[in-house]
Amino acid sequence: GQSLEQPSEVTAVEGAIVQINCTYQTSGFYGLSWYQQHDGGAPTFLSYNALDGLEETGRFSSFLSRSDSYGYLLLQELQMKDSASYFCAHNTDKLIFGTGTRLQVFP
Amino acid sequence: NAGVTQTPKFQVLKTGQSMTLQCAQDMNHEYMSWYRQDPGMGLRLIHYSVGAGITDQGEVPNGYNVSRSTTEDFPLRLLSAAPSQTSVYFCASFGEGSGYTFGSGTRLTVV
């Protein structure tokens, strides 16, 4: 089967660094994506890892280890507006989402 | 460039009624998908399409039908609405290098 597991909730303070982990089981794996969703909004694309290693996009970085079936999203210099739910998703011929992690950033 | 457009934004149905949720994209994307999201939950794939004339089932297809007669449109049909189908429905399309782009969602309540 296909499944992706994430912690349900993470809390941090403004300016801190937080890491959201994602472990997956799948067949026909192409890559791992990350999406952000604010309450009441639609998911928005953050990053995509097709190969092992780190991808950096501004304050956000994403890492993938295919041999460990593991990835993470790293958020630096946290801001209040980063409070949202974050989903990993694996790409095969379709996009399957993880369980989601709710990030709460406190002042 | 409107991206992915979903209509309606809100809908209330009675049990047993049928309806079609509309989804259109203007980015010439081949891949399109429908998801449902229940409160506090992740997104579950209902149906998806890799191009016009081709559709396939996702994780939770029962009670839903789709068709893809054009690249732009991917409607989702509820055959006989049930309270368990109360959810937020998102349509998405995929383009190389840009990830999936989601519509703003349809909030459906079945009473």
Image (cartoon, grey):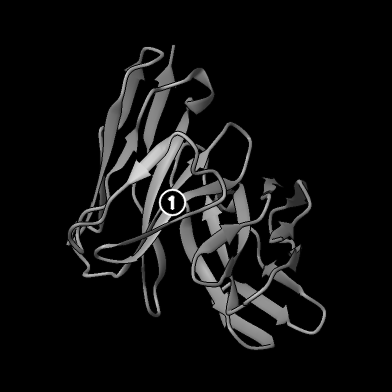
Q: Residue B68, percent across and down? A: 25, 56
- Considering depth in this image, is B37 or A78 the residue closer to the camera? B37
Q: Which quadrant: the N terminus of chain A?
A: bottom right
B106 in relation to B86, above or below: below
Q: Secondary structure at mark 1?
A: strand
- Considering depth in this image, is A12 or A14 the residue closer to the camera? A12
Q: Quadrant of residue A60?
A: bottom right
Q: Residue B40, percent across and down? A: 63, 35
Other-residue count near label 1 (Cα within 10 Å), few / some / many at <14 / 14–19 / ≥20: many
A5 in relation to B19, above or below: below
Q: Residue A81, percent across and down? A: 54, 50
Q: Quadrant of residue B6?
A: top left
Which residue is at 82% across, 79% downward?
A68
Tag 1 subunit: B
B92 in relation to B109, above or below: below
Give the amino acid at mark 1: His
Answer with left or right where residue B93 lies relative to residue A66: left
Q: Residue A105, percent across and down? A: 68, 48
Q: Which quadrant: the C terminus of chain A?
A: top right
Q: Which residue is mark 1?
A: B47
Which residue is at 72% across, 70% downward?
A72
B58 in relation to B20, above or below: below
User: Going by the picture, which residue comes out furthest to the right?
Assistant: A68
- Considering depth in this image, is B21 or B103 the residue closer to the camera? B21
- Considering depth in this image, is A75 or A97 the residue closer to the camera? A97
Answer with left or right where residue B51 lies relative to residue A44: left
